[in-house]
Amino acid sequence: MPRENRFFADWERSSACGHRIFDHWAFDIHDLEVREQKREIGFIPRPLKMPTERVLAGESVSVHRLMERIEAIDAEMGLPFAWFFLMSHGYWVDLGCRPHHRRRTARRARAPA
């Protein structure tokens, strides 16, 4: 599934689905043609509002503290499951929380459905 479709599918399957997606996200649309390759049309989701603090994980940070922080992000953003969309699209979450992120991004692999 293309990553753009995945964004909308994830939204529809999440607790955020009761909210209008365009009230929370803008989309930078691109239309690229690379020599001798197919045309690529897609977008980069951009949150309209950012939380005041990033979610930072370290060895001394407990799972309970992380849960408190993501719940605070949801409340601050006014959107259930906001933390997931910020994390999965590279915003405001320490990459240390997701050690596989750099490897996945470098290969442009997609998460399993």
Image (spheres, grey):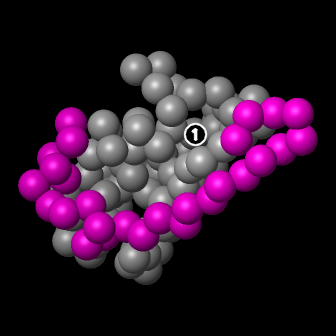
- Residue 81, how many percent across, how many down? 26, 52
- Residue 52, how many percent across, how many down? 43, 80
Q: Residue at x 20, y 71 (%)?
A: 78
Question: In this figure, which residue is indicated by the disc labeled 1?
Answer: 98
Q: Residue at x 10, y 55 (%)?
A: 18
Q: Name the outermost residue toward the left.
A: 18
Would you say residue 59 is visible in this rendering?
no
Q: Can residue 14 be found in the magenta stretch?
A: yes
Q: Can residue 19 be found in the magenta stretch?
A: yes
Q: How many marks?
A: 1
Viewer-proximal residue, 72 or 59?
72
User: Where does the C terminus fall, quadrant-wise?
Assistant: top left
Viewer-proximal residue, 33 or 14?
33
Q: Name the outermost residue toward the top.
A: 112
Q: Name the outermost residue toward the right.
A: 35
Tell me the element at label 1: loop
Name above or below for residue 111 compared with residue 96: above
Q: Residues within 10 Å of mark 1 (few under 14, many from 20)?
A: few
- Residue 106, how many percent across, how many down? 77, 36
> Is 41 on the left-hand or right-hand side of 87?
right
Name above or below for residue 41 compared with residue 112: below
Instruction: Give, as a three-letter code, the residue at label 1.
Output: Arg
Would you say residue 73 is visible in this rendering?
yes
Residue bounds of the magenta highlight: 12-39
Q: Residue at x 42, y 70 (%)?
A: 26
Q: Quadrant of residue 79?
A: bottom left
- Residue 94, how many percent across, how many down? 59, 55
Q: Quadrant of residue 107?
A: top right
Q: Residue at x 51, y 26 (%)?
A: 111
